[in-house]
Image (cartoon, rainbow, N blue to C red):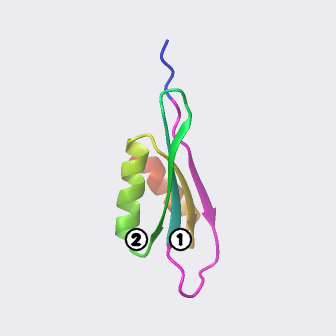
């Protein structure tokens, strides 16, 4: 029996801060035995680029942790729509 991992998306929201990115995202990749093989953190300044990268990661089964000043409820609805 082959079990598929469920992709996790976690969103933390914070108040807008001067000179900070619109979002920092941590991407976590796993191997077939569910062991972490790679973690990458990216800061985003452009909303459209941020959205496209997060969507691509989710479609590839990569866990996504988002720390952002954007509206978390709106972002959650977009992610639910994308998946």
Residue 12 horizontal/vertical position (percent)? 63, 62
Please tell me whether mark 1 sits on a helix, a strand or a loop. loop
Q: Residue at x 43, y 46 (%)?
A: 58
The answer to whether residue 81 is above or below residue 50 is: above
Q: Residue at x 53, y 67 (%)?
A: 24
| Pointer 2 residue | 47
The answer to whether residue 9 is above or below residue 49 is: above
Residue 52 horizontal/vertical position (percent)? 35, 59
Residue 8 horizontal/vertical position (percent)? 55, 43
Residue 70 horizontal/vertical position (percent)? 53, 71
Dominant secondary structure of the magenta stretch? loop
Report the Cα–Cα distance between label 2 and label 1.
9 Å
| Nearest the eye: 14 or 29 | 29
Please tell me whether mark 2 sits on a helix, a strand or a loop. helix
Query: Contact (CB < 8 A) between labels 2 and 1?
Result: yes
**Residue 83 visible here:** no
The answer to whether residue 40 is above or below residue 47 is: above
| Pointer 1 residue | 70
Most distant residue in the front direction:
37
> Which quadrant of the figure has residue 18?
bottom right
The answer to whether residue 61 is above or below residue 17 is: above
Quadrant where the image shows the C terminus:
top left
Provide the residue span drawn in magenta. 5-22
Q: Is residue 7 magenta?
A: yes
| Nearest the eye: 47 or 43 | 43
Q: Residue at x 40, y 65 (%)?
A: 50
Label 1 packing within 10 angstroms: few (<14), some (14-19), many (20+): some
Label 2 packing within 10 angstroms: few (<14), some (14-19), many (20+): few
């Amino acid at each position: 029996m082959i079990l598929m991992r469920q992709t996790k998306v976690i969103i933390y929201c914070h108040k807008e801060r001067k000179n900070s990115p619109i979002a920092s995202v941590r991407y976590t990749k796993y191997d077939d035995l569910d062991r972490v093989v790679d973690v990458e953190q990216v800061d985003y300044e452009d909303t459209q680029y941020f959205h496209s990268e997060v969507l691509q990661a989710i479609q590839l089964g990569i866990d996504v942790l988002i720390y952002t000043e954007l509206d978390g409820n709106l972002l959650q609805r977009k992610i639910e729509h994308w998946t």
